[in-house]
Image: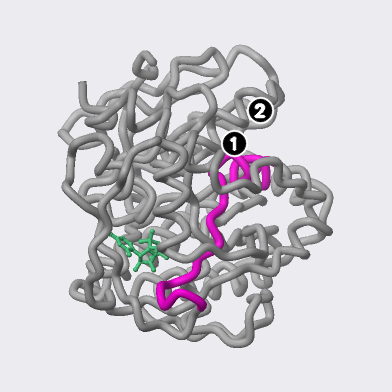
Amino acid sequence: MTRAQESPSPSGDVSPPPPPPFTQDMPVVMVAGGAGYIGSHVVEHLLSLGVYNVVVFDNLSTGHSDAVPSHPNLRFVQGDVRSDSDLDRVMEAYPVEYVMHFCALSLVGESVSQPLKYYDNNVVGTLRLLEAMVRHSVPHLVFSSTAAVYGQAQPEPIREDTPTIPLNPYGGSKLACEQMIRWTCEAHGLKAVALRYFNAAGASATGDIGEDHHPETHLIPLILQVPNGKRDNIKVFGTDYPTEDGTCVRDYIHVSDLASAHALALGHLAQTQPGFNAMNLGYGRGFSVRDVIDHARSVTGEAIAAVDAPRRPGDPPTLVAEAGRAREVLQWVPENDNLDSIIGSAWKWHESHPDGFKK
Ligand code: UDP
């Protein structure tokens, strides 16, 4: 994949020249955080639809420029969501109709030790973005949210009206963003949808983009580091949870199904009244850590060593979605509800890119 056309860095004394205009007259979607894992898959999907111009806005702190494709309907602007001038630059250069907001720090453990870093990046970033949207009269927002807003939710499966009591600053920061968005919709007539992902996993069928976090903390990429020769074993964090096999249960959802839900959310926002709606994205069924390791063994054909380890702080035993609202309101029909194909697509990416996007 070639690197996208890029405007110069916003840092420095001289203002960068405005990025080139689009040649086709289509609605402009600004994807803040479009160089990250989920954002880049959404961008790929939006471009495949051929009905949107896409501006990827990313500071590349955790995203990858190689995750942003060269495409006639895409422009890349390097900038920070907390910077008024960066946001003004992109919203003055393009007639943005929709914003998708993926810019966030998302490591639960780090958020516990550095909560203010999370509130600065996630909450202040969303605050500045909302201010810019109001300033430039951008009416539509799709916000990347998380099941972490629920905390240790009971009963299962989790509905959108299940009480939100986050267990960690990451979930707390995302919930604060949702509340800020809700009030902004009421005051300024915005339309917004927050999509609460359960466990995003897998990679694009193209094999060109996939998950590449530093450090990596997520279960499936870590498991696949074992057959890739990057680690000796996978640690199972906690074997005494109140679940069938004692390990945590999660609702793993293919990133391609997340991408299709985001595109449907744009169509929904175009038709709906001002206001805010939150929707879960998951399949409504859970797999334990041991289940996931077993499936990875069968997909890769490798004996993957697993070692029991203590619980990881902040992990709820079970998180499974009830995603009827997304199916009903967005007409979302997931197509990859199969753990083997989720792990298979991730394996295709990791096997061919053992060092991620690093050349
Ligand atoms: N997990 C594990 N070993 C690891 C990484 C994760 O046992 O090396 C467990 C983790 O404790 C949780 C599940 O796998 O129960 C999913 O964790 P992940 O970080 O992928 O997603 P989260 O549910 O935290 O969003």
Find numbered disc 2 in the image and state the secondary structure of the residue it sits on.
loop
Q: The disc labelled 1 sits on which kind of residue?
A: Val
Residue 280 at x, y percent in the picture: 64, 64
Specify whether tag 2 is near ligand 1 (CB below 8 Å): no
Q: Which residue is mark 1?
A: 29
User: Between residues 257 and 296, which one lies in front from this camera angle?
Assistant: 296
Question: Dot 2: within a 10 Å radius of its alpha carbon, few (fewer than 14), some, or many (20 or more) residues?
Answer: many
Residues under numbered marks 2 and 1 in contact, where contact means CB atoms less than 8 Å apart: yes
- How far apart marks 2 and 1 lie (CA) works out to 7 Å
Q: Which residue is mark 2?
A: 52
Residue 270 at x, y percent in the picture: 78, 46
Quadrant into which the C terminus falls: top left
Identify the residue at horizontal 39%, vertical 41% (top origin). Answer: 36
User: Between residues 77 and 193, which one lies in front from this camera angle?
Assistant: 193
Q: Is residue 39 visible?
A: no
The verdict on residue 184 being magenta is no
From which residue to which does the magenta span run? 244-263
Identify the residue at horizontal 51%, vertical 22% (top origin). Answer: 206
